Image: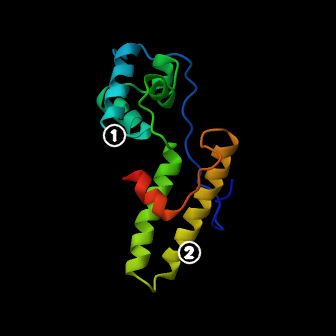
Amino acid sequence: MARMHARRKGRSCSARPMVSENPAWVTVSAAEAEDLIVKMAKDGYTSARIGLTLRDQYGIPDVKLLTGKCITEIMKEKGVAPALPEDLSSLMRRAIALNVHVKLNKGDHSNRRGLQLIESKIRRLEHYYKDNGVLPADWKYSLKTAEIMLK
């Protein structure tokens, strides 16, 4: 598949092996894994960071094989899920940082174009999440409200 905002082809990535059950060498139980997820979510980790930490430090290769649920589902059940979806909030953080850069460097037109592309991705995600009921219908993106929401 091609890139969204470039003329290049997409990047080919390796695929995860088809495994249907948790490996025998995993010593952590499902309840312990859920407790670790809740603890890290309360510390402010994103779901991607939680997955990396569980893989690298606790030897859990796949949370879904261990618990039967993905990390965001566990976070929602325990009431520690963030208000905004992770992909939307990370794009908003990038837009805020790039806006600061563009204000300091008035002649940087390529990054100004990059800011426009990031904001178009945010608006596209906003429309998708409104259609699926994740965001309220009156939610609107702007850089000022993004700075307030993410602080």
Are the residues flagged by discs 2 and 1 in contact, CB closer than 8 Å?
no
Residue at 56% across, 46% down: 13
Tag on residue 58? none
- The image shows residue 149, relative to residue 56, as above or below, that is below
Colouring method of the image: rainbow
Residue indicated by mark 1: 44
Residue at 44% across, 70% down: 99
Q: Residue 75: image x %, image y %? A: 45, 28
Residue at 37% across, 27% down: 37
Residue indicated by mark 2: 113
Describe the element under mark 1 as helix, strand or loop: loop
Residue at 35% across, 39% down: 45
Q: Residue furthest bottom?
A: 107
Q: Residue 19: image x %, image y %? A: 55, 22
Q: Nearer the viewer, residue 136 or 150?
A: 136
Mark 2 / mark 1, whichever is N-terminal? 1
User: Callout 1, which amino acid?
Assistant: Gly
